[in-house]
Structure formats: structure tokens, C-alpha cells
Image (cartoon, grey):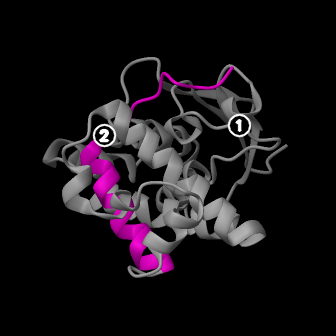
């Protein structure tokens, strides 16, 4: 069943569009959207700021769909880089309270920092309770994205949440200076009930 329940912050969407414009080129983004027969106004910040959370989710998913269609196999890397830069934006624009918590987080033991950094990510994305959760699995982690705005009205034969992948990788690296192996094992675009990521750190 296609995900039509997602929502996304219009303010965060504006930040994502700025990052996408820098990554693919401000003049090229409207071309990318037009090729996929999607609204060219999704490239305009002023238009996005008036969107509802549901419309913002549709645009967030549509922008990623357009990049996948336009860049083919190269899209995965592009979207993951966008996710990495998005994490930097989220931290920079965080509230004073979240920045204070982030500073405390960096002083925790490494094992605790891993999970705490993903929980911080969920808060910075303005998710509500139960929409995004992190679970410990032995030495590894599972992140479950139950709302998954990337998959809004999307269908695919393989996982598509590459920006989320980039966000998680950068959050973990920021917290621990290490890169886990990240695999999206379930995706709503494939008909699964949620999007789930396994983060493997290599300890036995």
C-alpha cells in the first residue's frame, strides 16, 4: 500500500531544497523536476514556506524521485551527500536546548553516543513520539522510520531512503568518528509497513 500518511516540516523542506540546489545546480533543479513532470515551483523557497506538512512531504518525496529518475545509478550517492549536509544544517539551526544536549552527548561513552545521536536526529527532524525509534540489537542498532516522508506516494522495487541513510551516517560519524555499515532492510516504497535500517558497527 502506498504511503500517503507522511508529513514533513515546510521549514526543513526549504533547507533541503537549498542543499539540493547547491548539489545539482540552482539552474538545473527546475530541469530535473520538469523531466519528471513534477512542479517546477518545488525549487522555489518562497513557494515551499506556505505548504502544509502533508504537501511538504509530497514535495520532499517528489524531489528525491526526480533526482533518482534524472541521475540513475548516480542518484544514491547524490542523495546520501544531501543527507550528510542536511545533518550539518540541522545541528547548526538547532535550538539552544538541543545544542546543549548535543554537547553533553559528545561526552558520553561511545556505545551510548551511537544511539543518542540517532535519537537527537529524530528530535531535530521534528518527529513525534513513535514516528521514529531507535533500538539496540547486540552491539548494533535498528532505526525504524514509521512515517517516512521520503516514501510519500512512492513505489519502487528497492529501498529509496538515501537521504535518511546520509543523515544517519553523518550523525553517527559526528558522534563517534566512525562509519557504520547501514542497510535499509525494509522500505514503505516496497510495500513494507515501515522503513527500517540496520546499523552494524563490527564488534563481535
Residue at the spot of label 2: 9
Percent position (x, y) of residue 199? 70, 44
Residue 175 shown left or right of residue 78 in the figure: left
Foreground disc of the pair 2, 1: 1
Kindly identify the residue that appears in the image at 31 percent across and 59 percent down: 15
Q: Quadrant of residue 148?
A: top right
Q: Along the line of sight, which residue is nearer the eye, 108 or 171? A: 171
How far is disc 2 from disc 1 in space, using C-alphas?
Answer: 22 Å
Q: Residue furthest left?
A: 96
Q: Along the line of sight, which residue is nearer the eye, 147 or 84? A: 147
Can you tell which mark lies on residue 171? none
For the residue labelled by badge 2, is the local secondary structure a helix, a strand or a loop?
loop
Kindly identify the residue that appears in the image at 50 percent across and 73 percent down: 31
Kindly identify the residue that appears in the image at 17 percent across and 42 percent down: 97
In the figure, 85 relative to 168: above or below? Answer: below
Residue 149 seen from this side: yes
Tell me the quadrant of the picture where the N terminus can be found: top right
Q: Earlier in the sequence, mark 2 or mark 1?
A: 2
For the residue labelled by badge 1, is the local secondary structure a helix, a strand or a loop?
loop
Percent position (x, y) of residue 159? 74, 43
Residue 57 covered by magenta stretch: no
Residue 24 shown left or right of residue 194 in the figure: left
Q: Give the prevailing secondary structure in the magenta stretch.
A: helix
What is the magenta range?
Answer: 1-24
Residue at the spot of label 1: 155
Percent position (x, y) of residue 187? 71, 34
Percent position (x, y) of residue 19? 39, 69
Amino acid at each position: 500500500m502506498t504511503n500517503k500518511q507522511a508529513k514533513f516540516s515546510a521549514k526543513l523542506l526549504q533547507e533541503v531544497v537549498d542543499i539540493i540546489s547547491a548539489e545539482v545546480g540552482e539552474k538545473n533543479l527546475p530541469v530535473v523536476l520538469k523531466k519528471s513532470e513534477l512542479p517546477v515551483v518545488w525549487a522555489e523557497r518562497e513557494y515551499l514556506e506556505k505548504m502544509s506538512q502533508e504537501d511538504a512531504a509530497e514535495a520532499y518525496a517528489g524531489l528525491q524521485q526526480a533526482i533518482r529518475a534524472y541521475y540513475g545509478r548516480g542518484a544514491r550517492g547524490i542523495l546520501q551527500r544531501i543527507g550528510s549536509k542536511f545533518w550539518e544544517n540541522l545541528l547548526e539551526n538547532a535550538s539552544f536546548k538541543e545544542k546543549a544536549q548535543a554537547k553533553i552527548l559528545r561526552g558520553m561513552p561511545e556505545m551510548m553516543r551511537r544511539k543518542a545521536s540517532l535519537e537527537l536526529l529524530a528530535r531535530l527532524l521534528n518527529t513525534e513520539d513513535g514516528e521514529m525509534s531507535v533500538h539496540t540489537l547486540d552491539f548494533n542498532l535498528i532505526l525504524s522510520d514509521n512515517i517516512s516522508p521520503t516514501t510519500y506516494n512512492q513505489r519502487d522495487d528497492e529501498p529509496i531512503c538515501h537521504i535518511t541513510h546520509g543523515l544517519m551516517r553523518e550523525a553517527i560519524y559526528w558522534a563517534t568518528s566512525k562509519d557504520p555499515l547501514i542497510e535499509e532492510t525494509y522500505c514503505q516504497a516496497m510495500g513494507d509497513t515501515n522503513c527500517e535500517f540496520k546499523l552494524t558497527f563490527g564488534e563481535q
